[in-house]
Amino acid sequence: MKSNKQELYQKSFEITDLIEKRSFGVLRLLGYTLLLFTFIDYIAILVPPRLTNPDWELKVISMFVDRIWSPLLGLTFIFLFTEKSLIYPREIKILKILSWAAFFLGLLYLLMLPLGINNSLTIYRNFNNQVTNKVAQRTEQLQKINEQLKSTNNPEQLRRVAQILNPQSQKENNTPPEELKNKLSQQIEQVVQNVEASAKATKKQQAMRWIKESVRINLGAFLGGACFITFWNLTRWVRIIDKNAN
């Protein structure tokens, strides 16, 4: 009995035409499922729309690029056929629709490219303006404090300025007013330099981040569009199959 089982396991099985057909049928089922999930994802991404919002538009493009594998794999699985495959008339109509769908998807991804570049630049400019405005506001506050500092020798007022510059420090009760005044003036200059240096570093860091993200998104949109257009061109056979049959 044991030897019969071993012989059964050691036998080789030939893949028949029926098994091959059903195997490709599984792939096509997976392909249609991927396209269905892609359609649901795209609708979820686009709703609710916030057009003219550069942050939302760039996020949408990024999510479309990140999900490009799903429709590409889905279409590839659906269009897999062998030499012995039979394609029914109803299936040919569906394949024609999907072939043109690949073209319009490619066009959509290519049209995302200028929009993505423009939005990346807009977001980066907005961020730079925000940082610049914050620096200007902080510098203006420090300049007002410095002007107040120059126009007073009152020890109590000088101590209040010291508390504003460094709330965690203890009041300098024993420091002479003139010495405290010079010390506070130097602190203000140092704070201004620190604010400007911090803003410069933040801008540089953000610029590198946005360059990498912009390249990833926009290059992905271009490659995705090129892939879909190429797929449309390679599936030309299904769009002219009726002409060849005649």
Image (spheres, rainbow, N blue to C red):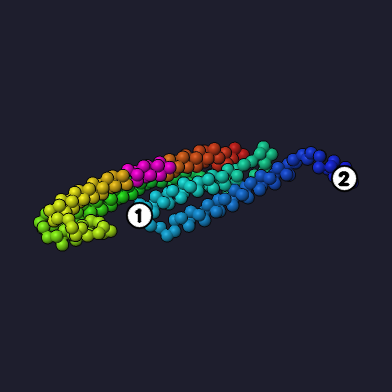
Place of residue 225 in the rendered image (x, y in percent of width and height, measured from the top left): 46, 42
Quarter occupied by the C terminus: top right
Q: Tag 2 or tag 1, which sits nearer the N-term?
A: 2
The residue lying at 36 percent from left, 42 percent from top is 208
**Range covered by the magenta-colored residues:** 203-216
- In what element is the residue under mark 2? helix
Place of residue 41 in the rendered image (x, y in percent of width and height, measured from the top left): 50, 54
The residue indicated by pointer 1 is 53
Most distant residue in the front direction: 174
The residue lying at 48 percent from left, 47 percent from top is 66
Please tell me which residue lies in front, 146 or 239.
Answer: 146
In-image side of 206 versus 76 (left or right)? left
Residue 224 shows in the view = yes
The residue lying at 18 percent from left, 53 percent from top is 184
Q: Main secondary structure of the magenta part?
A: helix
- The amino acid marked with disc number 2 is Lys
